[in-house]
Image: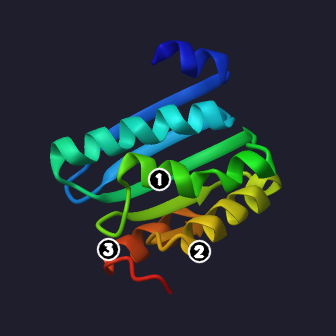
């Protein structure tokens, strides 16, 4: 797994179980190879801990291409990430927020319970309220 992180030029990856959710922090370049490795690890950790609430916090320096972003729906299906998961994702870099919004739209169209935010308190509030779509 470390090879994938290095090839994607990731500066930081932290997956930390909290009381009622899994905190995922990632900074750096985000290609689809990175996304596949990251979400594989997230799905594995969620299943091991039987915790399907995810708070992701990212500062993306280089987002995936539009074609790669479109593949997230199939990636989630392949990994078994479905309706039991609630994902609050925070993108802190305004210049890459548009790509994250496209990923959110793709996942919503696939029936995922996911919501994109630009700050952590709003994401936590949504996740704590039960994470209904909107």
Task: Give the residue pinned by disc 1.
Answer: 76
Of the numbered discs 3 and 2, the one sitting upstream in the chain is 2
User: Label 2, on which residue?
Assistant: 109
Between the residue at mark 3 and the residue at mark 2, the CA separation in whole angstroms equals 23 Å
For the residues labelled 3 and 1, the Cα–Cα distance comes to 22 Å
Q: Which percent across, then down, holds residue 42?
A: 37, 42
Percent x, y of residue 70 = 69, 55
Up-down relation of residue 111 to residue 119 (above or below): below
Disc 3: which residue:
128
Specify the quadrant that holds the N terminus: top left
Q: Determine whether the residue tagged by mark 1 lies in a helix, strand or loop.
A: helix
SS class, disc 2: helix
Which mark sits nearer the N-terminus, 3 or 1?
A: 1
* Label disc, if present, on residue 108 of the rendered structure: none
In the image, residue 52 sits, relative to residue 109, either above or below, namely: above
Residue at image coords 37%, 71% = 127
Q: Along the horizontal axis of the image, is 56 left or right of 73?
A: left
């Amino acid at each position: 797994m470390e090879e994938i992180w290095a090839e994607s030029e990731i500066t930081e990856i932290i997956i930390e179980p909290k009381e009622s959710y899994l905190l995922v922090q990632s900074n750096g370049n985000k290609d689809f190879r990175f996304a596949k490795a990251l979400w594989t690890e997230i799905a594995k950790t969620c299943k091991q801990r039987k915790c399907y609430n995810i708070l992701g916090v990212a500062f993306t320096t280089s987002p995936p291409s539009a074609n790669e972003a479109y593949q997230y729906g199939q990636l989630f299906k392949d990994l078994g990430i479905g309706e039991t998961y609630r994902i609050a994702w925070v993108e802190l870099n305004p210049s890459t927020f548009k790509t994250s919004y496209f990923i959110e739209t793709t996942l919503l169209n696939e029936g995922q319970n996911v919501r994109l935010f630009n700050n952590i308190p709003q994401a936590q509030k949504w996740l704590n309220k039960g994470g209904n779509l909107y």
